[in-house]
């Protein structure tokens, strides 16, 4: 199988060196891998680093660099899909690290009959310090981040609603088309929803693993959670089927906190006490869990305060997103997102390799 290994980036110069090294060391035959980079008009040295990688070549079948004027992820991924020509298209995030057998493991599982495969995607930190290990613990925790199964290595093959760093047979994208460019943060959810609706299963395989760099700054982490929550709220009006109940847990917590605070203000504090007691119990239990599973750091004592910051930021983001639905729907009313999805689908079919091109 010919593989298209795709990566998009915007101002990721600080993160790319490790990933580029990982790509160059892949044990799958390099003459069967084409590398597709999409630069979303970076203002740092991201494009120059891509050019240097292309000049070196590493024996790959082809290395393409595309510049995308739009800076949202969906547009950049669509640019990658319309460039890729492989039988298999693999997505890798710019903040990722991949083992040398990452491509070969994906291909092996696809050859077993799967159409979309991926594996666990645990978080790592590039700079070891007490504070950054604390943030990594918060991000790795089910309580602090997400219950999504793909975030942790799988013990056996299982079929999930979504995958990270997934590998897709070309026919899958030729059937469902590209990403919805109206969406941000949730474009994966909607894309994978259409894949499932088309009848394909998404297999999480225990022998596939890749790694994602956790945010090393609490301010950025809180902002990321807020933005994720906001897009959950907005996406509810665009594709409610691609969201799960878990996406709205922080929203429900914030709403409950507001409601109980109002009751406390009018003289009924018991509900607020009960809510805080229940949340506090989960908070402490999960903090203790982090201490038993991680290399314990002194700053882990801050986790009981970090967890609610992340939850409240996410929940407020969802509230803001829900409030913004009318204005957002108005702004995208005349967008060509559906036409772009179809355009990508046609281009993927058009770019399918002919026998003489293999």
Image (spheres, helix red, strand yellow):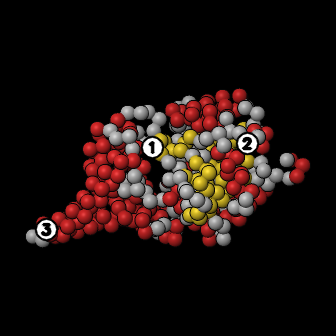
- Quick one: label 3, few (<14), some, or many (20+) residues within 10 Å? some
The answer for how far apart the CA atoms under marks 2 and 1 are is 27 Å
- Quick one: label 1, few (<14), some, or many (20+) residues within 10 Å? many
In the current view of this chain or complex, which residue is farthest to the right?
356
Local secondary structure at mark 1: loop
Q: Position of residue 16 (x, y in %)?
A: 56, 35
Which quadrant of the view contains residue 286?
bottom left
Given this view, does label 2 or label 1 mark the residue nearer the observer? 2
Between 333 and 201, the residue placed more toward the observer is 201
First in sequence: mark 1 or mark 3? 1
The answer for how far apart the CA atoms under marks 1 and 3 are is 38 Å
Q: Are marks 2 and 1 in contact (CB under 8 Å)?
A: no
Local secondary structure at mark 3: loop
First in sequence: mark 3 or mark 2? 2
Q: Are marks 3 and 2 in contact (CB under 8 Å)?
A: no
The answer for how far apart the CA atoms under marks 3 and 2 are is 62 Å
Q: Residue at x 27, y 50 (%)?
A: 304
Q: Residue at x 64, y 66 (%)?
A: 201
Q: Residue at x 33, y 67 (%)?
A: 252
Residue 79 appears in the picture as rendered: no
Does residue 190 appear to the left or right of 254 in the view shown?
right
Q: Which residue is mark 3?
A: 269
Q: Which residue is mark 2?
A: 28
Q: Which residue is mark 1?
A: 214
Q: Position of residue 77 (x, y in %)?
A: 61, 51
């Amino acid at each position: 199988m010919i593989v298209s290994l795709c990566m998009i980036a915007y101002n990721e110069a600080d993160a790319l060196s490790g990933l580029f090294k990982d790509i160059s060391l892949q044990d799958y035959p390099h003459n069967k891998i084409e590398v597709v980079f999409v630069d979303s008009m970076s203002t740092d040295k991201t494009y120059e680093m891509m050019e240097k990688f292309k000049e070196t070549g590493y024996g790959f079948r082809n290395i393409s660099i595309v510049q995308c004027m739009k800076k949202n992820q969906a547009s950049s991924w669509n640019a990658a899909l319309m460039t890729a020509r492989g039988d298999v298209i693999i997505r890798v995030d710019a903040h990722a690290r991949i083992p040398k057998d990452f491509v070969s493991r994906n291909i092996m599982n696809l050859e077993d009959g799967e159409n979309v495969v991926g594996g666990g995607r645990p978080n790592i930190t590039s700079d070891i310090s007490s504070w950054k290990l604390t943030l990594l613990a918060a991000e790795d925790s089910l309580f602090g981040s997400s219950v999504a199964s793909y975030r942790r290595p799988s013990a056996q093959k299982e079929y999930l609603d979504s995958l990270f760093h997934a590998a897709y047979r070309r026919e899958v994208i030729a059937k469902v088309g590209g990403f919805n460019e109206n969406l941000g943060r949730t474009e994966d959810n909607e894309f994978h929803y259409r894949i499932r609706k088309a009848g394909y299963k998404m297999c999480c395989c225990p022998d596939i693993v890749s790694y994602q760099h956790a945010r090393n700054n609490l301010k950025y982490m809180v902002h990321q959670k807020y933005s994720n929550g906001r897009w959950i709220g907005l996406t509810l009006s665009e594709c409610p089927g691609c969201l799960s109940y878990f996406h709205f847990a922080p929203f429900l917590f914030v709403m409950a906190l507001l409601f109980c605070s109002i009751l406390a203000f009018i003289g009924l504090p018991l509900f607020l006490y009960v809510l805080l007691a229940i949340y506090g119990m989960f908070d402490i239990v999960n903090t203790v869990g982090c201490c038993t599973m991680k290399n314990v750091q002194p700053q882990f004592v801050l986790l009981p305060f970090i967890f609610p910051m992340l939850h409240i930021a996410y929940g407020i983001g969802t509230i803001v997103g829900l409030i913004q639905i009318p204005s957002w729907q108005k702004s995208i009313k005349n967008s060509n997102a559906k036409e772009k999805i179809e355009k990508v689908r046609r281009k993927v079919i058009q770019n399918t390799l002919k026998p003489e091109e293999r």
